[in-house]
Amino acid sequence: MPETATNGMPEPAGADQPRPESEGELPRWGMVADLDRCTGCEACVLACHAENNLPIVGEEECENDRAFNWIRVERYWEGEYPHTKARFMPILCQHCTHAPCEPVCPVYATYHNPEGLNAQVYNRCVGTRYCANNCPYDVRFFNWFDPHWPEPMPMMLNPDVTVRSRGVMEKCTFCIQRINGAKEQAAIDGRPLATDEVVPACAQACPPSVLVFGDLRDPQSKASKLVGNERRFQLLGELGTEPVVIYLKQAGESS
């Protein structure tokens, strides 16, 4: 059983463990989102589209419930008029420790990798959409069409990310191409991966630094230090999925 924090929520797996120094030990990736900082600018959404070659589906497809964003910013209202305040919450794949999407995939296209990521194998996916139906966070998207970018827009596509074909499920990967790129560069340099060296596109683009990504096993990482904050909570944490995306509620907000 996972250890329990003082607020009664289970700690993300490995969050309280010191970073092992033995060769071959793997990180435990996670993200912290401070909602007290979020202004709803959606720079994270735009950065995710640019980094991961996400197509713009247009207004007509959105009306058909075919919106396509690996990360979205939910807006909700707090208080009574005229003292109403808008609140914002970025939502992406929670990379659950006990992911409901994984056991229902008949072809094992979605699985948990050794570094704690909920990975997606696109060329194995047959588009059953079982995983999307079993995800309580609504963060998986079915690719309804072959993406098309008019000239010269194909020149802007990220060569490190595959352009997915029609008929597969897609979702946030914590910019795994950046994770792998950083690990490869560290290996070339003959050094261990530096603390907070990996920064996903959404976190890099966020003006008020809402999103903090890092190794939860590294006690020196910014994300690991924020996990113990008294404002922390997990989205739908009562379901027992144990997400590694941790939210910090607004300062002064009640539970």
Image (cartoon, rainbow, N blue to C red):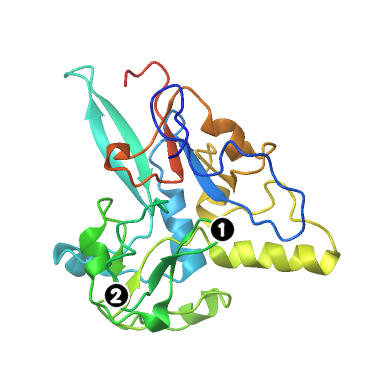
Residue 175 in the figure: left or right of residue 186: left
Residue 123: image location, x then y, percent: 41, 83
Q: Residue furthest toward the front?
A: 1
* Image depth: mark 2 or mark 1 in front: 1
Residue shown at the point (43%, 75%) measured from the top left: 121
Residue shown at the point (46%, 59%) measured from the top left: 48
Residue 208: image location, x then y, percent: 53, 36
Pick the quarter of the image with the C terminus.
top left
Residue 137 position (above or below residue 32): below
**Residue 83 figure quarter:** top left
Residue 209: image location, x then y, percent: 54, 39
Q: Label 1: which residue? A: 115
Q: What residue type is labelled 2?
A: Asn
Residue 189 position (above or below residue 77): below
How many marks overall? 2
Q: Do the residues labelled 2 and 1 touch (CB within 8 Å)?
A: no
